[in-house]
Image: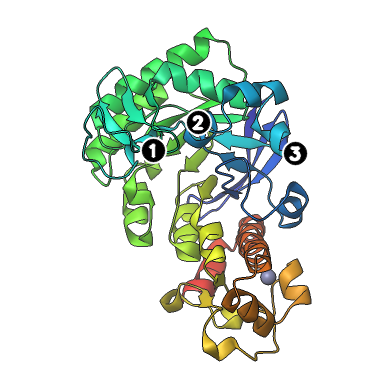
Amino acid sequence: MEFSFEVVKNDKKTRARRGVIKTAHGQIATPAFSPVATKATLKALDPKDIKKTGSQVVLGNTYHLYLQPGLRVISKFGGFAPFMGWAGPTITDSGGYQVSFLKDYSHKDENDRSGGIIRITDEGAVFRSHIDGGKYLLTPELSMEIQKILGADIIMALDDPESYDRTLKWEERSFTHWKKIKSKQSLFGIVQGGIDPKLRKKSLDFVLSMDFPGIAVGGKTIGADPKITAKALDTIVDLLPEDKPLHALGLGGGPEGIFEAVERGVDIFDNSSVTRMARTGLLFVYPQDGGKRENKFRVDIAKKKYKSEFDPVSKVCKCYTCQNFSMAYINHLFKSHEILAQRLATIHNVTFVNDLMNRTRESIEAGDFLALKSHWLS
Ligand SMILES: [Zn+2]
């Protein structure tokens, strides 16, 4: 068995749990953060940097990698991880999210060659590539085939974030095809249904009936607002099985969102805004640095007030950036549009979130998860 999940310790007061996911490419101590390497790169960082940020796993995007560089190239390398030189565990999404969110929801004219959705039917999603205007049909079966070649340890069933009923059909087809092609990857079923308890429960029951190795929770409610994320997770928390890892797709909301999710049993999550924010100069800070719920635990480093600040971004952070550079220098790099700005900022933000997860894991082990949460959010 190449994939396993084990709970090492349950928090007594909440659903938070400390666990270990084992994959063919190494272990993931959970709860864990997976940074997003959309196009087989965690923008501005190479694999050595990624490792130094404390990252245990990275997530690649099926939609992007399928279109560029394409499966012929990736298959020569035996997957996107060897292609990018990353030796650790990996995850891919199904492509469904990107396809649905191409431009807007307005279905396009068949002959319009700019990127976007043409139509979504029960068969699959017909879309045009945002790169070259080529027309594609993404089906659950194709998503499984693509993800097999991309070679991640954890893969996702194809869902349609906009249609609950279609998601059920597509998940079943994903599961059937995954069995048929005898993929050794671990397929996660996706629980949809927003904040409607009935739909969430129905969706979870369906996923559980198929014995997926793991469960992912997706949809817009897992996005930006921690309160809505908490509400959405509350609809399924008590129904979740003990023996399966729970992945939150695109979990947003910074530290607050992370605490709400971990409290409700989320074992692993990905999020692309951690790195995207870094590239615009939004850097995370600890409570000791003045980070709080109101400022979303972040500073805008390009602001004038940091222009001659001698201190590092965070006095607590152990990252390469904080150990070696002042806020003034990073402010200067952003103001003068130097590419080093993006690398140093990304190193900091990814290290910060990984360190937060490390602290979370330690607090669950020590039995004081809620104390850590209130220290951050009070
Ligand atoms: Zn730092």
Q: Amino acid at mark 3?
A: Gly
Q: Nearer the viewer, residue 288 or 39?
A: 39
Q: Is residue 274 above or below residue 60?
A: below
Residue plotted at (69% across, 76% down) = 316
- Which element carries disc 2, helix, strand or loop? helix
Give residue 345's position: percent from left, percent from top.
63, 67
Residue plotted at (44% across, 12% down) = 176
* Residue, disc 1: 97
Whole-angstrom CA distance, mark 2 to mark 3, is 20 Å
Residue 185 in view, yes or no:
no
| Colouring convention used in this rendered image of the protein | rainbow
Q: Are marks 1 and 3 in contact (CB under 8 Å)?
A: no
Give residue 259's position: percent from left, percent from top.
49, 60
In the image, is the residue at mark 3 within 8 Å of ligand 1 by its beta carbon? no
* Residue, disc 3: 85
Q: Amino acid at mark 1?
A: Tyr
In the image, is the residue at mark 1 within 8 Å of ligand 1 by its beta carbon? no
Residue plotted at (52% across, 47% down) = 269
Disc number for residue 67: 2
Quarter of the rendering occupied by the N terminus: top right
The quadrant in which residue 354 appears is bottom right
Q: Nearer the viewer, residue 288 or 312?
A: 312
- Describe residue 313's horizontal placement relative to residue 373 as left or right: right
Whole-angstrom CA distance, mark 1 to mark 3, is 26 Å
Q: Where's ligand 1: which quadrant?
A: bottom right
In the image, is the residue at mark 2 within 8 Å of ligand 1 by its beta carbon? no
Residue neighbourhood size for the residue with mark 2, other residues' Cα within 10 Å, grouped as few (<14), some (14–19), many (≥20): some
Q: Is residue 103 above or below residue 143?
A: below
Give residue 229's position: percent from left, percent from top.
36, 54
